[in-house]
Image (spheres, rainbow, N blue to C red):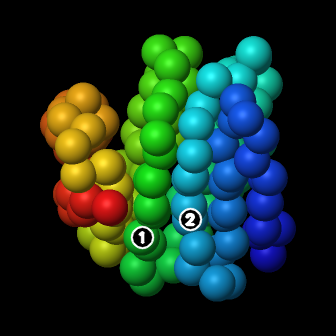
Amino acid sequence: MITPIRILPTSESLEITLDKEMGRFEFHGKSLPENPNEFFEPVISWFKEYVKEPNKETIVTFKMEYFNTASSKRILDVLSICHDIHKKKLSIIINWYYRYNDDDMKETGESFSEIVQLPFKFLTY
């Protein structure tokens, strides 16, 4: 049994919910942590454990207002791990939300989708 993770948001870090039983894999807010490796380490470890026995369907939601370059590397690490689910021929969908006028966030999601070769759904809010 993989223990859920809940990270509460701060003005500089994301709210993250990872709960296999509930099927919730969510990233919300801003990501500017002082030490992104330290911040994302438990998240990356959790996903490495999760992909060993993923749910039949995995929907990962990113609804981020902003993230810095260091965070983008760690987000890509998470997405790369998620690609292992795709390789197992199981359903994985990345819901990438962006503000209706935030072309940069949409383009970043499109780039990430190409890099990790996962299906993204682009949704505005």
Q: Tell me if I can see residue 77 in this picture.
A: no
State whether residue 12 is above or below residue 2: above
Q: What residue sits right under mark 1 in the picture?
A: 59
Mark before the other along the chain sequence, 1 or 2: 2
* Cβ atoms at labels 1 and 2 below 8 Å apart: yes
| Three-letter amino acid code at the position of disc 2 | Phe
- Which residue is rendered at x = 78% and y = 60% of the image? 5
Residue 96 image offset from top left, x and y in percent: 33, 54
State whether residue 18 is above or below residue 36: below
Q: Tell me if I can see residue 53 in this picture.
A: yes
Quadrant position of the C terminus in the picture: bottom left
Q: What residue sits right under mark 2 in the picture?
A: 25
- Which residue is rendered at x = 34% and y = 73% of the image? 90
Q: Tell me if 69 is positioned left or right of 49 in this view.
A: left
- Which residue is rendered at x = 75% and y = 16% of the image? 34
Q: Which of the two residues, 8 or 17, is positioned nearer the viewer here?
A: 8
Quadrant position of the N terminus in the picture: bottom right
Q: Which of the two residues, 100 or 104, is positioned nearer the viewer here?
A: 100
| Three-letter amino acid code at the position of disc 1 | Ile
The residues bearing labels 1 and 2 have C-alpha atoms spaced at a distance of 7 Å
Residue 115 image offset from top left, x and y in percent: 23, 32
Badge 1 crowding class, 10 Å Cα cut-off, few under 14, some 14 to 19, many 20 or more, is some
